[in-house]
Image (cartoon, helix red, strand yellow):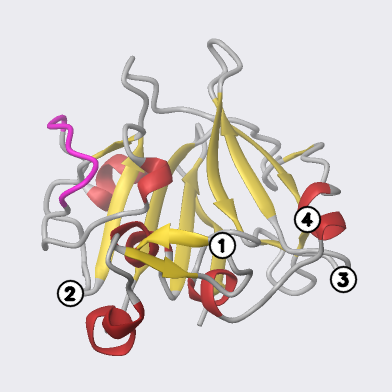
């Protein structure tokens, strides 16, 4: 079963406001399409299909990381550094950042720190090829945010609406809430219509 059947994609484009009112990551704004009547959508879940403004909905995947030893469709980090995953538009080579475990998610913003070498020395040189030999996919992304940022962090927001992150930098509170999700999942559907889970990370 492909993504079009599994997630019932809509042609109406809206990348900020989810069907249930959840807001998605700011770095994906402009690169997603709504999904009509998404199956089993959680109240704290934002779910979208990757799609460019030009209408491209099929992508190649390149990444830094490795495949999980037991769940061999999943991209995970290495012993050296966390994962970094891009989608590539095959029509023009444009890259879309899907996930950077050094920058995205609650832990990366508020709990874990990484060295400059870990952040910068992650060559995105591996092409993702599924077990059927396919390298081009339709992609659906879900982020989940069960963290009560208003309750837990509002008092740490300064007069300019900024909050200090674990690395000492400051970020707009609204952006931190949207990019500080506690879980991310990415699914990919190949040309045969087979859907696999590409990424699944708990981040809090």
**Contact flag, marks 2 and 4 (Cβ < 8 Å):** no
- Residue 50: quadrant of the picture: top left
User: Where does residue 190 sit, x and y in percent of width and height?
Assistant: 52, 38
> Disc 2 on helix, strand or loop?
loop
**Label 4 neighbour load within 10 Å: few <14, some 14-19, many 20+:** many
User: Where does residue 55 sit, x and y in percent of width and height?
Assistant: 32, 19
Residue for badge 4: 65
User: Where does residue 114 sit, x and y in percent of width and height?
Assistant: 75, 68
Choose the circle earlier in sequence order: 1 or 4: 4
Front residue of 172 and 198: 172
For the residues labelled 3 and 2, the Cα–Cα distance comes to: 34 Å
Q: Is residue 64 above or below residue 58?
A: below
**Label 3 neighbour load within 10 Å: few <14, some 14-19, many 20+:** few
**Contact flag, marks 3 and 2 (Cβ < 8 Å):** no
Choose the circle earlier in sequence order: 2 or 4: 2
Residue for badge 2: 43
Residue for badge 1: 169
Choose the circle earlier in sequence order: 2 or 1: 2
Residue for badge 3: 79
4 left or right of 123 in image: left
Residue drawn at (51%, 35%) of the image: 137
Q: Is residue 15 magenta?
A: yes
> Disc 1 on helix, strand or loop?
loop
| Residue 147 visible in the shown view | no
User: Where does residue 34 sit, x and y in percent of width and height?
Assistant: 20, 42
**Contact flag, marks 2 and 1 (Cβ < 8 Å):** no
Query: Residue 154 bears which disc, if any?
Result: none
> Disc 4 on helix, strand or loop?
loop
Question: Magenta part of the protein: which range?
Answer: 11-17
For the residues labelled 3 and 1, the Cα–Cα distance comes to: 26 Å
**Contact flag, marks 4 and 3 (Cβ < 8 Å):** no
């Amino acid at each position: 079963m492909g993504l079009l059947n599994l997630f019932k994609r809509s042609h109406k484009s809206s990348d900020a406001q989810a069907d249930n009112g959840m807001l998605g990551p700011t770095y994906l704004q402009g690169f997603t399409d709504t999904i009509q009547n998404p199956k089993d959508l959680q109240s704290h879940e934002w779910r979208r299909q990757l799609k460019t403004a030009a209408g491209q909905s099929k992508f190649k995947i390149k990444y830094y990381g490795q495949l999980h030893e037991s769940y061999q469709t999943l991209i995970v980090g290495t012993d050296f550094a966390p994962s970094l995953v891009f989608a590539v538009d095959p029509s023009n080579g444009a890259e879309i950042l899907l996930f950077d475990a050094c920058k995205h998610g609650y832990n990366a913003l508020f709990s874990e720190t990484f060295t400059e070498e870990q952040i910068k020395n992650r060559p995105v040189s591996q092409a993702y090829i599924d077990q059927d030999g396919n390298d081009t996919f339709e992609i659906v992304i879900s982020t989940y945010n069960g963290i009560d940022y208003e309750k837990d962090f509002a008092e740490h927001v300064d007069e300019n609406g900024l909050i200090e992150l674990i690395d000492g930098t400051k970020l707009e509170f609204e952006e931190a809430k949207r990019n500080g999700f506690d879980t991310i999942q990415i699914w990919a559907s190949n040309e045969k219509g087979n859907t696999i889970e590409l990424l699944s990370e708990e981040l809090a």
